[in-house]
Amino acid sequence: MKKATIELLAPAGSFEKAKIAFLYGADAVYMGTKSLSLRTRVDANDDDVARTIEYAHSIGKKVYVAINIFAWDEKYEEIEKVAKELNKIKPDGIIASDGGVIECLKKNAPDIDIHISTQANVISYHTSKFWYNNGAKRIILGREMNKEQIKELIKNKPEDLEVEMFIHGALCFGYSGRCFLSDFLAGRSANLGDCIQSCRWAYNVYVEDRNTPGELLPVETDDKGTYIFSSKDLCLIKELPEIIEMGVDSLKIEGRLKTEYYLASVVNTYRAAIDDYMKNPAGYDYKKYLNELEKTKTRGLTTFYFNDRENKDIQEYEGKQYNLEYEFGGKVVDFEDDKVIIEIRNKLSLGDKMEVIVPGQIETIKFEIDNLYDIDTGEKIDTVNPGKANQKVKMKLPFRGRKRLDIKKKEK
């Protein structure tokens, strides 16, 4: 049964990314501690976590913190310390997957709700009941489930157990993300937050010659047959109405590794799609939302197993493919008289075609750059390159700036 409200949950690899997610419509964000989540190379530091929680609560939003590694015994002293600290700063939930970690959280962070990570492979209402009986407030579904299985789980789960599911973002070649390939090839464990993303690599495949033991022969493939582990990205924008009607509590976007541009664009698009459907279900047209999402994709898009457990359209044979038509131009970080200050991400020049992602609306504002000013001298310039960290430029916009953090994208 459709909920009166449904949570849009966005990734936040830092305090700044959390602010962008909230600005563009997220109801909540999830982020990791520096060494105890599955994105340890990008996750926020401890100060970022505390700042994000304080900021989110000041504007009526929520923050969930991930301690979702599968922990060796030597990790538990740190887990206990972090859990006690989280119990003080009060996130709205802690995401975990390891039974031992969950027991530690129950003891050392008793005031914080426990959310069972997708890493725990929750794919049945029987497992849901187990975690509910062991203190869970929410379960995050395994991405292997199809819609009929999700409906059955929701129908039979404990009434007050919340259900969260992924609706957009990268998929990995493992069972709900549990993979040992990275550890095997590079000594960096995905289950300890240090994945090298070896499933995205190009591989050459060899077989042993039966007539000459020890001699390896290459398996002949065309140029689309080498990325044997790389999957497409999940996108359920077309299926969003059906998901809402199921009664799912939280819709999750993957992407703590992604850029601010990706975050703003995807969150803004799903926010608009959810709100539009809630207001007028009969008028829902997924194509206009898909058009915006396709400007940010790095790989092909798939519905994975949601519609069909036999779906084979999940492989990305081309490897990592950036969208060649759009790139992240920059973000507005401040105003100065009649100009905005833009922190650039790629080269900007007079004549470049730009789009502004406006919080709260699916339609972008399009314009062509006809002025640029040096950030230090104020003199007119023709082009600016991201030659140094946080490189900025001044620009007069052909419309009134609406928000401090409008994100721009540049059509190439």
Image (cartoon, rainbow, N blue to C red):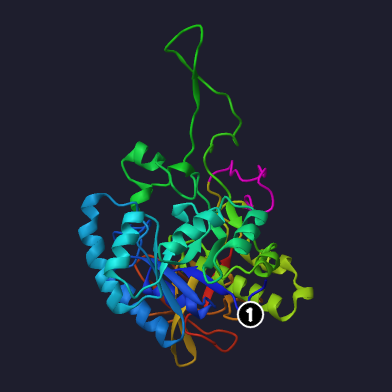
Outermost residue toward the top in this view? 211
Task: Tell me what residue is drawn at x 65 percent, y 46 percent.
Answer: 309
Residue 328 percent coordinates (x, y): 51, 66
Q: Nearer the viewer, residue 369 or 297?
A: 297
Q: Is residue 378 visible?
A: no
SS class, disc 1: loop
Outermost residue toward the bottom in this view? 337
Q: Is residue 391 visible?
A: yes
Residue 13 percent coordinates (x, y): 39, 66
Q: Quadrant of the N terminus?
A: bottom right
Q: Which residue is mark 1?
A: 4
Disc 1 packing (10 Å; few <14; some 14–19; many ≥20): few
Query: Splitting the image into 4 quarters, where does residue 297 fall?
Result: bottom right
Residue 91 percent coordinates (x, y): 37, 75
On screen, 225 above or below 36?
above
Magenta-colored stretch includes residue 289 = no
Q: Nearer the viewer, residue 282 or 85?
A: 85
Query: Splitting the image into 4 quarters, where does residue 102 fall?
Result: bottom left
Task: Tell me what residue is drawn at x 50 percent, y 80 percent.
Answer: 23
In the picture, measured across the screen, residue 260 lies left or right of residue 361, that is left
Q: Nearer the viewer, residue 21 or 84?
A: 84
Q: What's the magenta bit mostly, secondary-structure-wise?
A: loop
Query: Splitting the image into 4 quarters, where does residue 336 fall?
Result: bottom left
Amino acid carrying label 1: it is Ala
On screen, 162 above or below 219?
below
Q: Nearer the viewer, residue 74 or 35?
A: 74
On screen, 357 above or below 385?
below
Residue 338 percent coordinates (x, y): 49, 91
Task: Tell me what residue is drawn at x 38 percent, y 42 percent.
Answer: 182
On screen, 305 above or below 168?
above
The span shown in magenta is 302-319
Q: Quadrant of the C terminus?
A: bottom right
